[in-house]
Every structure is written in structure tokens, then in C-alpha cells.
Amino acid sequence: MAQAGEVAVGSRVKKMVSPVAMATPILRIATFHSSSLGSLIAALPALATLRDSFPGARICSFARAPLLPLLQNFAAVDEAHVRPGGGISSQAALMARLHGADYNLALSFSQGSNAFLLMWATGAPIRAGFVPSRMDALLTHKIHKEGPLRIPDALELARSVGATPRGEVAREWLNVPFETPPRAEALLGAAGIERDYIVVSTERRKSDKGVESPEVTPEMVQRLAERFPVVLVGLKPASPALREVGDTAHPVLDLGGKTDVLTLTYLCQTARGIFARGNGVIQLGKLFNKPTVALSDSDDPAGRALQLFGF
């Protein structure tokens, strides 16, 4: 049962946090993000909230290189910088740069130790992040979170530092560069796909219990391709079994390992629906209000997708 000063949210108990009283104007904000596409998408509404709440501040966001184009084309962010991978030694150069940049406020949407170290290096008097974490002592403001980052979590973190969500719609802040649609359309056109295609993500993802999510099978792809063109996406090419499903009424195009994050974003924006194993592509689909089916949602995910995508 929730104790005094706590409120139950879903299956989690979160501390009630009073917004920080700002003694000085917020002129420079740093945000740090994990390597997860799904987590970055979940943080976008919070970034828009920070922009609306601190209109005079310069927002500098740090993410892994493959995800950086999303931040570079997100209107709420003024500067997007690469957050290096590796251990503490690989963070040293960035930590030195952060130390002299005069940040007033820093937020980490990642619970990783490296992200907390980078946030601490900013020297910002207000440093907000999620706990539990091994380095939560570096935080001045803590929000409890379990599991993958969700939009309500990210908004709560922004709210805790004085930002006020006003129902910002993240997709309205995202500007896909003009050169991306022709590149994506050329890939689709080469396979004879014009419209009404389904994006199928084969990317692996482990559940919170360390058990891998169900796999996309050739039988699933076969069933989907009888009704719609199928575009396979992922960090790596799909397995031969998925690429060679036999004769189908519609083409199956494997773009695994061939798309950057902006091309993937455009594909999800223009798809009829999203069928995915992992969280990142599902979140991209939801960003654009697309019908989505995760493999773990149903005992018959392909049947569920055919029903949902057929409208």
C-alpha cells in the first residue's frame, strides 16, 4: 500500500516530487539519453516540454551516434552531440567539455552510470534522473522508475525540475530532412512497393526477465505478405528464412542493415502498420499514430496484425 507522500501509478509506486524552485534563470540545459531507440522516442515529449517551459534556454542533448539524426531534426533541441560508448576513460574528453559549458540544469533519461557521470560533469546545480541507479548520489533530484522509459516517466522527470507539460505532440516537432523521403521511396520502388506496406522489425530484444521476446517466423511473414507488402527492418539483414518465404501475393523487401534512423522514421510514418519484436520501432509507429502489434501482445500476432491493419 502506498505510504504518505507516495502515489500508486500503474503497478509502480512513485515519490511525489515538488518542482524545483529556480534561484537563477535557466539558460543552458543538458539532456542525456540511452542507446535505445524506444527510450529516445519516449523522451521526445519531455524535450518539447522543456523547450516550452524554458523558452530562453539552450537545450543540448547527448545520444549515441546512430540516434543523433533524430535529435538534430527535432525542433526542441538546439544542439545534438554524440555521447561516446565505452567505459569511463572514453568519456573523459566529453566530461572536460561539459565542465566548462556553464549548464544550469541537467537531466538524464538514462539510468546508466556513464550518463550520470556525464551529467555530474556539467556542474549544473540541478541534476535530475531516475533511480534506482548505482550512482544516484550524483543526483540532486530523483524519480523512481522501473522498466523501460515510458512517456509518462519522461514527462514526470521534466515536471520535477519546474517544466509544465502542455500536451506537446512530439511528431509536430520532428522534421524529416527533404532528402530522406526520396531515398526511402527509391528503396521501396525498386521492390515494386508503392503504398499500404507493413514495417516488420526483426530486431531482437530481451525482456526484463532476461528471456528473449518471440521471434518473427517465416510463417508470420508469409501470412502478412498475402495481404500487404512487407518491409523487413533491423540492424542486420533478416535471416534467409525470412527473406525467402516463397511465392506471396505481395513483395517482401529486406532493408535490414540498410536504413539509418531517419529513413526508418519515414518508413514508419508512411506505413500502414507496424509489426515488431522490439520496442523501438513500436514506439516510432505510435509516434505517428500508426496501428502497432508487438509479438508479445498475442498468441497469434500475425492474425492480430491482419485484423488490425485491415481496418
Image (tube, grey):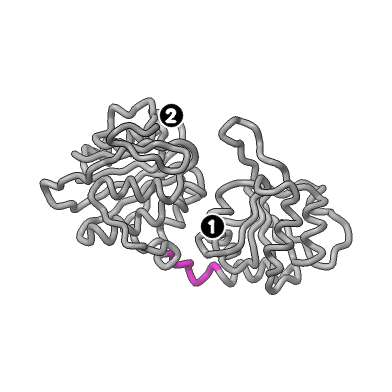
Picture quarter containing residue 135? top left
**Which residue was labeled with disc 1?**
284
| Residue at (77, 60) in percent of width and height | 224
Task: State the SS at label 2.
Answer: loop
Q: Quadrant of residue 106?
A: top left
Amino acid at pointer 1: Leu
Q: How far from the left and from the top, in percent, is residue 282?
A: 58, 53
**Residue 119 on the magenta span:** no
C-alpha distance separating marks 1 and 2: 29 Å
Image coords of residue 181 (percent x, y): 56, 70
Q: Which residues are magenta?
A: 174-180
Outermost residue, front side: 1
Residue placed most toward the observer, 279 or 92: 279
Name the residue carrying label 2.
87
Secondary structure mainly formed by the magenta segment: loop
Q: Nearer the viewer, residue 77 or 6?
A: 6
